[in-house]
Amino acid sequence: MTTWIPDVGASTDPIYLAIAKAIMADVATGRLKPGDRLPPQRELARELNVSIGTVTRGYIEAARRGVTRGKSGRGTIVRDTAAERPDSRLRVGPGTELVDLGTNLPIHGEHPDLSKAFAGLAHQEGVSRLLRYQAPQEDPRYLAAGGKWIRESGLNVDPGSVVIAAGAQHAVMVTLGALTEPGDLVFADELTCPALFEVAQLLRLRVQGIVMDDVGMRPDALLAACRQRNGQALYCMPTVQNPTSAILTAERRRELAEVAREYDLLVIEDEVHRHLAPDAPQPISEIVPERGFFIAGLSKAVAPGLRVAYVAAPPFARDKLKDAVAASLVMVSPLPLELATMWIEDGTASRTADRKRAEAEARQLIAREILGSYSYRAFATAYNILLDLPQEWKAGEFANEARRRGVAIAPAAAFAVPGCQPPEAVRISLGGAENRPQLRDALKVIAKILADGAPCRCTRM
């Protein structure tokens, strides 16, 4: 651990932001080096005479900006950005537009017609109620819409079991926040959604990666981990997993459910991509309903700005989750919730999901046409592909080169649970392009980099 103490006294920024900026500045000057461990949050709070929450928020902001990462058993460390991720500061070529294929974007061109929805809202009697405090968790109409969306996402559920959250990431946060304690251990795929790392750092949870194969998480690896360490929860994306696009088979889901039941694990089943594979097997939460938390979000199926998600929770946990939602944001904002409810009720949400799935399939065909001679992992209707790189390439270097040529992509290290070795691979988001011609051009850039080969790393003597 480094004895680093930030100088925040002269800053006019909020203390948490001053801490984050001090970390970034000291990384830039070399005072902090890759692999350095920052002081424990409690110790730094005592040194600066601020609350632990302020230091935690500063560390989270530094992680969000890509300079630090929580590492299992080591606290917060300075990231080796050259090895782990592309450098966002790299300039693209003159006159080159940066195409974002690095963010998991759900095809913006297929969003619902917002102006039409607002026009309908404007003619509703008493629409101004949406600007007032409400109790959406007790509203039968909102709960019925949530139950319908969960059923369309594959789980037969009663509206009474629904908890409303402000997006899937918020749903994960309130579930873990309500049911775990700081220091608890969460099992997850060795490559998983990076949002889990942010939630775990905020809640001071540990995350252990579980070995995967082409189908997804291996039950034998989860069993071995449970025998060695006392875990409290399992986080998984069974359908079109991020970033691998794997889909757990029915047998695999049953086996994971058996391990969860044997070792008393809560199962947080994040199914934001379920609409991309509507015929996927039975949810794990249906196999172990007494411990399953099924999350059905709208951001990937309808629009990312629609921050609404629904959790099907067991009876023992529903009030705890509702209390956690209230503690974190008082209430889910009524305006997006009303939009979500309208679109679920009239079928707009499901029709939008169908259109996005069809467009994703068309984009996968474009990817196959351009990159088909290379090894990559994908599903026929997924938003992403995970491209395995030739031996001469490092993923961070490849991503940097792609950015120089105008295409942003994400190296696998961005998804690796601390302590797990990521493959030399990059995730390419096919939904990030505004249209098919732009996607085709961007993928041709990636194909050209592959054809050119890695630059020589040899040094002169």
Image (cartoon, rainbow, N blue to C red):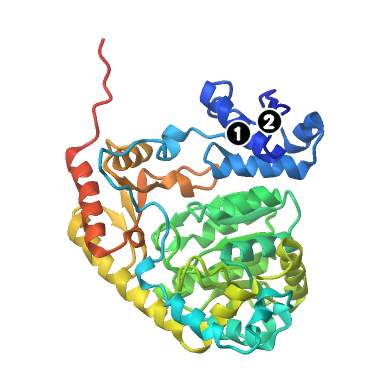
Residue 238 x %, y %:
49, 68
Q: Position of residue 126 (x, y in %)?
A: 66, 86
Position in image of residue 354 (x %, y %) = 37, 79
Residue 244: image tag: none
Which residue is painted at 73% across and 27% down in the image? 9
Depth check: give the residue in front, 442 or 288. Answer: 442
Would you say 343 lies left or right of 72 here?
A: left
Query: Label 2: few (<14), some or many (≥20) within 10 Å?
Result: few
C-alpha span from label 1 to label 2: 10 Å
Determine the image quadrant of residue 440: bottom left
- Are the two marked residues, 1 and 2, in contact with CB atoms closer than 8 angstroms? yes
Q: Quadrant of the image for the N terminus?
A: top right
Around disc 1, counting alpha carbons within 10 Å, would you say few (fewer than 14), some (14 to 19), or many (20 or more)?
Answer: many
Can I make out residue 71 in this image?
no
Q: How many marks?
A: 2
Residue toward you, 451 or 118: 118
Q: Quadrant of residue 171?
A: bottom right
* Quadrant of the rendering where the C terminus is positioned: top left
Residue 3 position (above or below residue 293): above
Vertical arrangement, residue 425 with respect to residue 385, above or below = above
Residue placed at 27% from the left, 35% from the top?
Answer: 392
Secondary element at tag 2: loop
Q: Is residue 25 above or below residue 52?
A: above
Residue 122 shows in this picture:
yes
Which residue position is annotated with label 1? 21
Say which residue appears at 42% left-offset and 34% top-offset.
83
- The disc at residue 11 is 2
Sequence-wise, the earlier of marks 1 and 2 is 2
Amino acid type, callout 1: Lys
Question: Which amino acid, mark 2?
Answer: Ser
